[in-house]
Image (cartoon, rainbow, N blue to C red):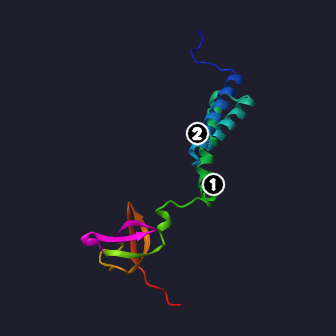
Amino acid sequence: MESDILILSPAALNLIWLGLFIVLLIIELFTVGLTTIWFAIGSLAAMAANALGANLIVQLIVFLAVSVLLLIFTRPWAAKHLNKNRLKTNYESKIGEIIKITERVDNLKQTGRSIVDGQEWTVRSQDNNVILEKDELAKVIAVSGVKLIVEKYEEEPS
């Protein structure tokens, strides 16, 4: 009695691995986030294993092993080095800026505002016990939602 397991020819498997490679590459081109490129390379490795005569189980193991190893060991390096010139988002660019307080910052009374680059922002102090008065300077140290988190700015002596 023959097995019900579908047996594919090496040529058919090559087409499947190539198709998977192309689909994963297209997804990567649209996401640009280094998400599927590792699996695309894994499919090429599986296609190579197929060309060398490995059976489907070995090909699947090669696909998964190469993909996961690349993901684990090269993604952090690639993300760090390939995103060097990435533009900061609107809120990220505010961190480190010195701003002028336009409304008294009092966390307990939930008050505080500043105008930064023509946009009004809600401002909160990093320390609930620190109150910043109108026209004082503050340094943005974080952004939480739509709020700038600041600390009192003190000019360093020259």
Whether the magenta-drawn stretch holds residue 92 is answered as no
Q: Main secondary structure of the magenta part?
A: strand
Up/down of 30 relative to 122, above or below: above
- Assign a secondary structure to mark 2: helix
Most extreme residue toward the front is 118
Discs 2/1, front: 2
Q: For this view, does 153 lie left or right of residue 30?
A: left
Q: Residue at 27% across / 69% down in the picture?
A: 110
What residue range appears in magenta? 105-124
Residue 22 tag number: none
Most extreme residue toward the bottom is 158
Say which residue label 2 marks.
27
User: Mark 2: which amino acid?
Assistant: Ile
Local crowd at mark 2 within 10 Å, few (<14), some, or many (≥20)? some
Up/down of 39 relative to 117, above or below: above
Q: Please provide percent x and percent y for residue 157.
A: 50, 90
Up/down of 73 relative to 117, above or below: above
Q: Please provide percent x and percent y for residue 25.
A: 63, 39
Q: Is residue 58 visible?
A: no
Q: CA distance from mark 2 to mark 1?
A: 18 Å
Q: Residue at 63% across / 37% down in the picture?
A: 63
Q: Is residue 135 visible?
A: yes
Local crowd at mark 1 within 10 Å, few (<14), some, or many (≥20)? few
Residues 100 and 72: in front is 100
Q: Quadrant of the N terminus?
A: top right
Q: Please provide percent x and percent y for residue 132.
A: 33, 79
Residues 148 and 118: in front is 118
Q: Residue at 60% across / 57% down in the picture?
A: 83
Say which residue label 1 marks.
78
Whether the magenta-drawn stretch holds residue 113 is answered as yes
